[in-house]
Image (cartoon, rainbow, N blue to C red):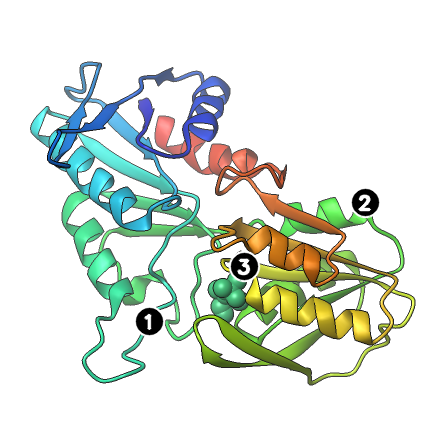
Amino acid sequence: MIITSLSNSKSIAKSLARKLKCKYSGTTISSFPDGDLYLKFNTNLKKKKLVIVQSFQPHSDMSLFDIVFAAETAKSLGAKKVILVAPYLAYMRQDKRFNSGECISSRVMAKMLNNSIDKLITIDPHIHRYKSLKDIFTISAKKLTANPLIAEYIQKKFKNEVIIGPDWESYQWAESIAKHVHVQATVLKKTRFSSRHVEVKMIKPVPIKGKNVIIVDDIISTGHTVAEAAKKARKMGAKSVSAIGVHGLFVENGMEKLKKAGVNKIITTNCIEHKTNKIDVTPLLFNELKREKK
Ligand code: R5P
C-alpha cells in the first residue's frame, strides 16, 4: 500500500504513512502556464493499493479535479485499488435544488468520485437531507466521526460547560458530543436570509448564565452561524464562549468574525490543516486503513 497526498493534507498523509509503516510518495502537482493541471506520480503503482489523502479545502473545486486526474492516472499506471481519504468532503451542503435551475452539487461530486475511485473514507460529512452516503455513492463509502475525540478534548480542557448546536443541521454533532461528555446541550434555530446573513433563536432553554459555552458545528465556513450563536450566548450571560468545528474553513475573515462576536477559543480538528487544529483525527483514519493494509 502506498500513501500519497495531492495539493492538500500533506502532513496527515505523512503521519498516516508513518503509523501504518507504508511508503509515502508525494505527487507532483503544478499548472501549465495556461492553467491546465499537470500531475505526476513519483513511484511505481503497478498492482499497488494507492491511498490518496486529500481534504477538499482549500479550493474545493481544484481539490476534486486533482483527485479525478490522480485516480484515473493511478489506474492507467496499474494500481489495483484507489482509496480516497478525504477528511473533509466538500459540496455536501447543496443536497437539493433550493431554487429552480440549481445544480445539486453533492450528486455531481459523488458521480465524479464513483467513476474514478474504488473507496471513499471521510470524516463527519454534512449529511442532512440524505440518509447516508449510500444515497449518492455507489462505491464503498465509509463515514467516520470525530465526536468521541472532540468529547475527550472537552473533558480534558473544560469545566462547568454547556454545549450549543448553532442550528438543527449541526445539532446531531452537539447532541452526540454532549452525551459523551454528560453535559446539557441545546440548539438554536437559524434563519438564513442569504449565504452571509443568518439569525438565531434558542429553542430548547438551558441555563447559560455563568457557564462556559461551547458552540459545536460540523463546518465553520464564513463563521456567520457560530458568530450569531456566540453573540446570543454572550447576551445570555455566558462566562466564556468557545467554538469547536470539525472542519474549519474560515473563509471571508471567519476567524476575525468569531473573535469580534466574543469567542474566546477557536478549536478545530486537523481534517483541514489550520492553525486552530487541536484535535488529531489520524487515529480514526489509521484504524480504518489498517484493515486495507492486510
Ligand atoms: C450548515 O448548516 C452547517 O452545519 C454549518 O452551520 C454551516 O456550514 C456554517 O457556515 P457559516 O460558517 O458560513 O455560517
Label 2: how many residues lie within 10 Å, few (<14), some (14-19) or many (20+)? few
- Give the labeled residue for mark 2: 157
Residue at 77% of width from left, 71% of height from top? 233
What x and y, as percent, mark residue 136? 26, 64
Between marks 1 and 2, how big is the CA–CA gap? 35 Å
User: Which residue reaches farthest right?
Assistant: 210
Q: Quadrant where the N terminus lies?
A: top left
Q: Can residue 294 be seen here?
A: no
Q: CA distance from mark 2 to mark 3?
A: 20 Å
Which residue does the image show at 80% across and 69% down from the upper left?
234
Residue at 80 percent across and 48 percent down: it is 155
For label 2, the SS is helix
Give the amino acid type for the residue marked by disc 1 in the picture: Asp
Label 3 CB sits under 8 Å from any ligand 1 atom: yes
Q: Check disc 1 and report the residue beneath it.
A: 95
> What residue is drawn where x is 22% and y is 22%?
48
Q: Amino acid at mark 3?
A: Asp
Q: Earlier in the sequence, mark 3 or mark 1?
A: 1
Task: Find out if the beta carbon at label 1 lies less than 8 Å from the nearest ligand 1 atom.
Answer: no
For disc 3, the marked residue is: 218
From mark 3 to mark 1, how far is it between C-alphas? 16 Å
